[in-house]
Amino acid sequence: MLTPPPARRGRSLMIQGTSSDVGKSLLVAGLCRAYARRGLKVAPFKAQNMSNNAAVTVDSDLPPGPDGDSPRGEIGRAQALQARAAGLAPSIHMNPVLLKPQAMVGSQVVLRGRALGNWPARHYHNLKPMLLPAVIDSYARVAADADLVLVEGAGAGTETWLRHCDITNMRLAEEADLPVVLLTDNDRGGAMAAVVGSWLLHTEDERARIKGYIVNKFRGYFSLYEPACATMTETTGWPLLGVARWFDAATHLPAEDALALERPQTATGQGLVIAVPQIARMANFDDLDPLSSEPGVDLRWVRPGQPIPAETDVVLLPGSKTTRPALDSLREQGWDIDILAHIRRGGRVVGICAGFQMLGHVVRDPEGIEGEPGETPGLGLLDIKTTIGGDKRLVEVDAEDTLSGARVTGYEMHMGRTDGPGLTRPWLRLNGAAEGAVSDNGRVMGGYVHGIFGADAFRRHWLKQMGGAASGLDYETQVDDALDALADQLETDLDLDALLALAR
């Protein structure tokens, strides 16, 4: 039974997109930082997010454990970044419904930090209306403690075939009486058709709720583009609320989902070469952002159909929502053979979370939590075995690694238990407790801690251990500097006073 939330305290404004990947999450993060710097208590909210990049929250709907410890929940990485931009700790109420894809047509559904199980898409659409009361309740709780709530829609608000089960776009705007600003993407072209098409597909009431539109990711001379904006405004009646220029420093901020990996990549050919196979259902791949920011690291994402480069120094296996299918995809691409050849040449292999599980002898899933019950042979590079099952472990980590003497920060987010003799040679020893495993020859290692490379001292130690060169990069400062730069740009590109006046 939901207890009534406090009364709404502040104003709200909703940002909807003309499609996915128009930059809603980044824009909201920048607005959170900009308005927070003006002295407002700002909070982000997104009813439903689909992403395997998640973050641990400070709260949960779950009761305290038997040891009295407060459990943790999880939300989308984008909402955690927005909370950081606003100067808040991440809460389950900022993203009450998180979908974590496990198959082409199915996802694990996480409601306010609690996994409800795996749902095929057609069944989830029937479930969504039953989730709406919890969504509205979470929104009310966020709004009760903020001067301004910036609400992010999902995908496109004009997907008419989903209106019957919408919980995150116009249905939410109607239920919570939210004014809406439409965001469109100029970089890919077609912004005019997207805005005018949105006007055509919305009902009269929905059109009235939209207060204007913003053109995002703009490059070039606005004087050449201004006639297009005049046509959009004349056709729809919606005013242009600003043109947000392309933001180069977005690469210094965590990506929301795997769409970011589809963009062209350039190998530098210099420094320590770290190859990352794009395994099935990759999760929390922002673990690698601090490494890609290092000037002495050449981080390469290996896409399906490509071999692992022969010049690779380190193969890094990232997390995945489904470990056994990830192993299958590794073998389908022949990357298992590449990895064994890499080891024979004296190379190193590192696994994080599911990547760690894949390095062992076998991954068992007797209850069918990730798919069909069964087991899949691992790569056999560490003397461990993993069984998927039990409660999900959600733990924040802030400890000293007594093996390296470095501080380690991050979080654990996984289901399953790993056992075996290999654990007697831990990768880390956090405040004296063993974590992960290292092979007898020292060239293969892995563990469960996500975000580990964001700890500067540990990253420098690890890079030197791998034969690379560490810089003086302060990664967390780099993220905050990028958020400040984004807020600075939005102050210039948009009329933030006018946008704030639209909120109610």
Image: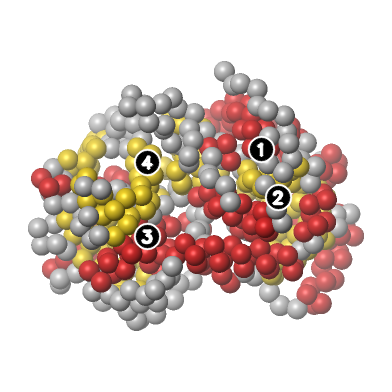
Residue at image mark 1: 145
Secondary structure state at the residue bearing disc 4: strand
Given the image, on which type of amino acid does mark 3 rest? Ala
User: Label 3: how many residues lie within 10 Å, few (<14), some (14-19) or many (20+)?
Assistant: some
Question: How much space separates mark 1 and mark 2, taking CA atoms?
Answer: 11 Å
CB of mark 4 within 8 Å of CB of mark 1? no
Q: Position of residue 168 (x, y in %)?
A: 65, 39
Vertical order, 163 against 242 (above or below): above
Given the image, on which type of amino acid does mark 1 rest? Asp
Question: How much space separates mark 4 and mark 1, taking CA atoms?
Answer: 26 Å
Q: Earlier in the sequence, mark 1 or mark 2?
A: 2
Q: Earlier in the sequence, mark 3 or mark 1?
A: 1
Give the position of the C terminus as an image quadrant. Answer: top right
Give the position of the N terminus as an image quadrant. Answer: top right
Question: How much space separates mark 2 and mark 4, taking CA atoms?
Answer: 30 Å
Residue beneath the point at 76% across and 51% down:
181
Residue beneath the point at 50% across and 67% down:
478
Residue at image mark 2: 40
Q: Position of residue 390 (x, y in %)?
A: 30, 30
Question: How much space separates mark 3 and mark 1, taking CA atoms?
Answer: 31 Å
Residue at image mark 3: 455
Given the image, on which type of amino acid does mark 4 rest? Val
User: Label 1: how many residues lie within 10 Å, few (<14), some (14-19) or many (20+)?
Assistant: some
Using the image, tell me which numbered label, if any, was put on residue 395: 4
